[in-house]
Image (spheres, rainbow, N blue to C red):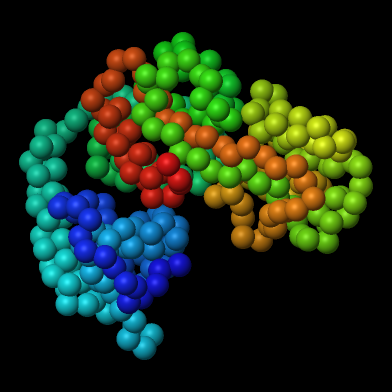
Amino acid sequence: MYEFNIDVMGPQISYLDLPLLRTYITVVDQQGFSLAANELHRTQSAISQQIKKLEQLVGQPLLRRSGREIVMTEAGELVYRYGWKMLQVEQQLREELFSEEITGRVRLGIPEDLATHYLLPILARFRDQFPRIQLAVECDLTERLYDNFKANEYELVILKHEQLNVSYPNRIVKTWFDPLVWVGRDAETCAKWQASDHIPIIVSPEPCVYRRQVIHRLGAAQLAPELAYVSESYNSKILAVRAGLGLAALPKSLVPADCVIVEKGLPELSPTQISLFHSEIQAKVAQFLRDRIVESFDAQLAV
């Protein structure tokens, strides 16, 4: 959570990131972190972290609380005024550079759960900015996506894995980390299953990196996994969790607010690694989308 009037050390570096300025200006314009998060299609926590980072770069607090309102400090007003001008210049530059409409095609592969939570806002903004670039997005399980990528069926692919034991490490654009946690409907239901030797699990069909880890870790802990519900769909698995059919292993950032994380009594799971890969031939139009994916994932996941 963002803390007002924090003690900030002197400036850390000599330049300011435009994405941080855009976030700050949106917070001021929307008069709050929650509304800014909705406007930028990010979590409130991610917005708070970006404001903290900008204050560290500037070396001074930019916002303070006045009653129920958020107001700018003197330094904040200066950053807002010049930041707004910088963003205007950036937009004008984009319009000049892209005055001739760019055409092309970008094929992207991504797991369905990541697409549902992270990708759709990115694609919407990308479509608005590059209306003549054809997007072809395919959602599937990681291992099938990886096979398709090796067959050159995508310009970009996002894969989930436990460790970097994949081919083409030189094609990895960036890797992010997300804790993998046990998730259930409520504490009472989870406690009942933890007291049993048999754990009903909600998983994807093979091939699935989460499924193999869950079954292996439960077996190593002398707990017998029972396949209670199997589906490729993230939303379907969440509905099964809410119905109390079993436990699921999910990246922490994807856990719905109305479900509970089981923190004790079950074997620890390895974090999810999420990597963005590019094809051998990097088309310029694919680089436009790649940069927007990196910017969005950086704001929401640990590097």
Q: Residue at x 44, y 50 (%)?
A: 300
Quarter-wise, where is residue 141 in the image?
A: top right
Residue, far front: 9
Q: Quadrant of the N terminus?
A: bottom left
Quarter-wise, where is residue 271 in the image?
A: top right
Nearer the observer, 37 or 121 = 37
17 over 159 or under it: above or below: below
Q: Is residue 143 left or right of residue 302?
A: right
Q: Quadrant of the C terminus?
A: top left
Q: Is residue 144 left or right of residue 120?
A: right
Q: From this viewpoint, is residue 228 visible?
A: no
- Exactly how many numbered labels are in the figure? 0
Q: Position of residue 9 (x, y in %)?
A: 26, 65
Q: Residue at x 26, y 21 (%)?
A: 283
288 over 191 or under it: above or below: above
Q: From this viewpoint, is residue 71 visible?
A: yes
Residue, far right: 196
Q: Residue at x 45, y 60 (%)?
A: 45
Q: Position of residue 21 (x, y in %)?
A: 23, 58
